[in-house]
């Protein structure tokens, strides 16, 4: 594909203003799936920032606050004066209504979960959708609601499009200005027609054509990398995970032998992971993606620097700094190595408070975005920085990587260092490796591995009483974690059969001397994170 066909893939872009909804990232994912680039920004960015972004449309997310509160969250006025289509979802609809002269009140009946809305007027968003000819004048839709406030009076120029028994304005529009409000959530799978509604907004109202495709993204990234790097050499920290493997494939395609991958065995890898990574890279090379990999044994160095360190943020930063030390040493052996490539992805940036606006809280530091030293001899290359995890996987498949490699469960940059609570040492790492290997082996045997998004074991540095045979044991605890997620921004624990968990627990306790108890983590994200640290 020539540059002329893909150079403008960022020109068709949607601005998503985040009012704090748990579904904001899911909105972004749905927009991307429909072939349109989008970015999430804080709701309180300036009008100049809105105009500078130059969106073809704007989406206002839901949020936990009440529009009726004195200190409520409002969209920048530039949103409504920029002559671009606007879609307000839940809180986004409510603030649109109130800011444009309508009225919002707390409802005496809250709506949470499944609902049926009657379509009461024609609209480009709804025409022909749902059960036509039933109930409302234009039919009805099955939707997902989550609100306590409601619009009771629409602004001048707006009409109601849909209603429920307790909410007269479940949707509204000003077709002349292409302003739309939905009290329900089209981004969730529980709204069956939600994707089609979003598509009509993006393509029909905003005029997007769907340029954001894996093939176009690959070519665009290749062009950007070649421009940034020139003829210099690039060193990549290869972990063998999905993100770094896709970066390796992309850079191999973009700059060929200018790339050297450094695979660091930091003593915090999973069982046999080093050999598996090297085998996967050899397979990629045999499939016309030549990748030069240098393997470095740095276990002693990492463990020495982590000795006695318990704070999770300190551990992440020590691991990040030590990686850079190793990479700088390897780069010194390569003439013209001026760049460090990393597998940073969009959720990393969001969770490290890397979005513009500065209002996000740091959820965790990532060694590839928030844990790097202030002074580095290498400049950063981060070709996946705009992409969600599922987009990365699509890119990997488009590049010809194996399905096994692309759909490996994510593994954090700091490795087992953030799956060992408290201080890290060689004994804890080995116990965790063995427990994790048993867990993954049983997941594959039960054909459950590919049904969950991420699964791993966690080492707890506390001792619990157990009895094996006739002997009393006072040994460590392992926690098992498995989650189901679309975007890794929200997740729920996987629902495994008790028989499966009992089998895994039995094997770990009986086969590993040093473990006396196994637990299963049923926490959702939020409020918990996926990793324990």
Image (cartoon, grey):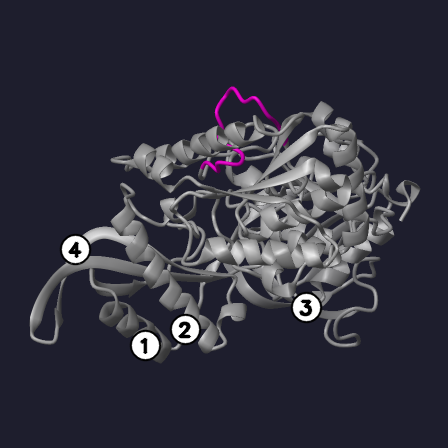
**Residue 461: percent from the left, percent from the top?**
23, 50
Residue 533 horizontal side relative to residue 344, left or right: left
Q: Circle 1: is it few (<14), some (14-19), or many (20+) Cα within 10 Å? A: few
**Residue 305: percent from the left, percent from the top?**
33, 32
Q: Earlier in the sequence, mark 1 or mark 2?
A: 2
The CA span between labels 2 and 3 is 35 Å
**Residue 119: percent from the left, percent from the top?**
74, 65
Q: Earlier in the sequence, mark 1 or mark 4?
A: 4
Q: Earlier in the sequence, mark 3 or mark 1?
A: 3
**Residue 351: percent from the left, percent from the top?**
51, 40
Looking at the rendering, which quadrant does residue 146 occupy? bottom right
Q: Circle 2: is it few (<14), some (14-19), or many (20+) Cα within 10 Å? A: some
The dot on residue 442 is 2
Compared with 407, 82 (above or below) is above
Question: What residue is pinned by disc 4?
Answer: 463
The dot on residue 192 is 3
Of tags 2 and 4, the one toward the viewer is: 2
The CA span between labels 1 and 4 is 21 Å
Q: What segment carries the magenta color?
A: 365-380
The CA span between labels 3 and 1 is 38 Å
Contact, mark 1 vs mark 2 (Cβ under 8 Å) = yes
User: Residue drawn 16% across and 55% down?
Assistant: 463
The dot on residue 503 is 1
Query: Does the stretch in magenta take in 470?
Result: no
The dot on residue 312 is none
Front in this rendered view, residue 75 or 308: 308
Of tags 4 and 3, the one toward the viewer is: 4
Residue 57 visible within the image = no
The CA span between labels 4 and 3 is 48 Å
């Amino acid at each position: 594909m020539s540059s002329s066909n893909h150079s403008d893939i960022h020109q068709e872009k949607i601005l998503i203003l985040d009012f704090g909804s748990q579904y904001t990232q899911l909105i972004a994912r749905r927009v991307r799936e429909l072939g349109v680039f989008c970015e999430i920004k804080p709701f309180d960015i300036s009008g100049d920032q809105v105009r500078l972004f130059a969106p073809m449309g704007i989406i206002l997310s839901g949020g936990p606050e009440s529009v009726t509160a004195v200190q409520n969250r409002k969209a920048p006025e530039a949103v409504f004066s920029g002559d671009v289509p606007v879609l307000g979802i839940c809180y986004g609809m409510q603030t649109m209504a109130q800011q444009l002269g309508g009225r919002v009140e707390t409802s005496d009946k809250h709506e949470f979960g499944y609902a049926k809305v009657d379509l009461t007027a024609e609209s480009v968003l709804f025409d022909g959708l749902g059960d036509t000819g039933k109930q409302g004048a234009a039919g009805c839709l099955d939707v997902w609601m989550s609100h306590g406030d409601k619009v009771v009076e629409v602004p001048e120029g707006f009409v109601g499009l849909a209603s429920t028994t307790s909410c007269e304005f479940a949707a509204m529009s000003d077709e002349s200005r292409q302003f739309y409000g939905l009290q329900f959530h089209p981004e969730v799978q529980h709204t069956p027609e939600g994707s089609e509604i979003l598509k009509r907004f993006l393509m029909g109202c905003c005029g997007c054509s769907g340029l954001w495709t894996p093939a176009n993204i690959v070519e665009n990234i290749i062009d950007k990398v070649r421009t940034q790097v020139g003829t210099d050499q690039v060193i990549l920290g290869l972990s063998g995970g999905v993100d770094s493997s896709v970066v390796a494939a992309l850079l191999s395609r973009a700059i060929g032998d200018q790339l050297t991958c450094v695979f660091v065995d930091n003593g915090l890898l999973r069982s046999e992971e080093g050999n598996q990574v090297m085998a996967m890279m050899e397979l990629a090379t045999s499939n016309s993606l030549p990748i030069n990999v240098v393997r470095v044994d740095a276990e002693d160095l990492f463990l020495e620097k982590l000795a006695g360190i318990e704070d999770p943020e300190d551990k992440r930063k020590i691991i990040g700094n030590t990686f850079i030390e190793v990479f700088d040493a390897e780069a010194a052996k390569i003439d013209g190595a001026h760049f460090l490539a990393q597998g940073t992805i969009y959720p990393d940036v969001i969770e490290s408070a890397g979005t513009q606006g500065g209002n996000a809280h740091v959820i965790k530091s990532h060694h590839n975005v928030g844990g790097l030293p202030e002074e580095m001899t290498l400049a950063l290359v981060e070709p996946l920085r705009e992409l969600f995890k599922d987009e990365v996987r699509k890119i990997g498949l488009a590049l010809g990587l194996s399905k096994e490699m692309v759909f490996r469960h994510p593994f954090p940059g700091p490795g087992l260092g953030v799956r060992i609570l408290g201080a890290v040492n060689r004994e804890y790492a080995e116990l965790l490796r063995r427990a994790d290997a048993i867990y993954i082996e049983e997941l594959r045997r039960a054909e459950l591995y590919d049904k969950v998004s991420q699964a791993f074991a966690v080492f707890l540095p506390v001792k619990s009483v157990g009895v094996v045979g006739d002997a009393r044991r006072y040994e460590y605890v392992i926690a098992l974690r498995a989650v189901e997620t679309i975007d890794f921004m929200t997740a729920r624990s996987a629902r495994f059969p008790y028989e499966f968990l009992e089998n895994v627990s039995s094997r770990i306790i009986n086969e590993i001397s040093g473990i006396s108890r196994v637990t299963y983590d049923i926490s959702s994200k939020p409020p918990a994170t996926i990793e324990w640290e």
